Image (cartoon, rainbow, N blue to C red):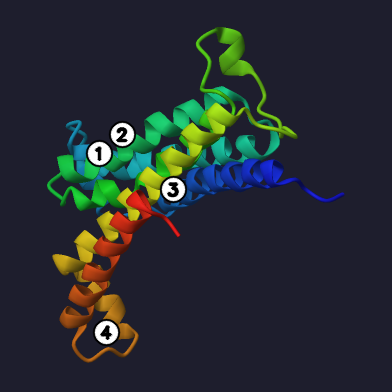
Amino acid sequence: MELTSENKIHYTLRIASAMCFIGHGAFGIITKQIWSNYFAVFGIGHNLSFQMMPLLGTIDILMGIAILIYPIRALFIWLIIWGIITALLRPLSGEPVAEFFERAGNFGAPLALLLFYGGAGLSLKGFTKIITPKSKFDLKAKKSAIICLRCVVFLLILGHGWLNLIEKKSLLNLYAALGFVNAGNIAITFGIFEVIASVIVLISPF
C-alpha cells in the first residue's frame, strides 16, 4: 500500500525522534569523557558520572524503542525537554553557544511531529494518547510544523557553520583526515557557506 505524503512525514519524524534517543543512549553506554563536564554542571563528580552514563544511556535507548513500537505523546514531550536540557549543558559547561544551536534537531523533530498533530495536549489523556498516522493533517497545524522545521534547520546549519568559523578542533581533524592540506581555510569556507545557507532556509527555502 502506497504511503501518503502525510504518512511519510509522520514516519520520518517519528523514526528521527527514535534515532535521536537511541543514538544518544549509545554514547551513554560506551561513555564519553567529555560528558563528565555536563554532569559537573549539576555538581556530579567524574567517577559517579561514568557510573551514571550507561544507566541513562539504557533509558534513552528504551525510550527510542518505545517510540518505534508504542508512540505516546509523553515520549515526544520528554524528548523535547531532554533534548533541550542536554543541548544547553554544552554552553553551560563552557562550550560555544553554537553547540546548542547545532543540536536543534534533537528536540526539533519531536516538536514538529507534535505540531503536526495539533500540539502536545494538556490533559492526562492527551499525554498518554498514541500518535498514529493520519490520512490528512489540519492545515493550521501543518503550517506551524513547517515553520518549526525551517527554524530547526536554520539553527542546526547556523550552529555547524559557526563551529566551522571558530575552527572547532574535531572538524579540523575531520578535514585533515579527508586529505585537505589547509583544514583551517576549508573550515572557514564551509562556515561562511553554511551560515549563508541557514539564512536562506529561514527566509526563502528552495
Residue at image coords 48%, 26%:
77
Kindly indicate the quadrant of the structure image that contains residue 183: bottom left
- Specify the label residue 88 is tagged with: 1
**Residue ID for mark 2:** 85
Residue furthest to the right: 1
Name the N-terminal-most of marks 3 and 4. 3
Q: Looking at the picture, which amino acid does disc 1 mark?
A: Leu
Say the numbered circle drawn on residue 176. 4
- Callout 1–callout 2 Cβ contact below 8 Å: yes
Residue in front for this viewpoint, 54 or 22: 22
| 3 or 2: tag closer to the N-terminus | 3
Residue at 16% across / 39% down in the picture?
Answer: 92
Q: Is residue 128 visible?
A: yes
Callout 4, which amino acid? Ala
- Which residue is situated farthest in the top direction here? 123
Q: As displayed, is residue 15 above or below residue 199?
A: above
Q: Secondary structure at mark 3?
A: helix
Circles 4, 2 touching at the beta carbon (< 8 Å): no
Disc 3: CA contacts within 10 A as few (<14), some (14-19) or many (>=20): many
Q: Secondary structure at mark 4?
A: helix
**Residue 203's x, y, as percent?**
33, 50
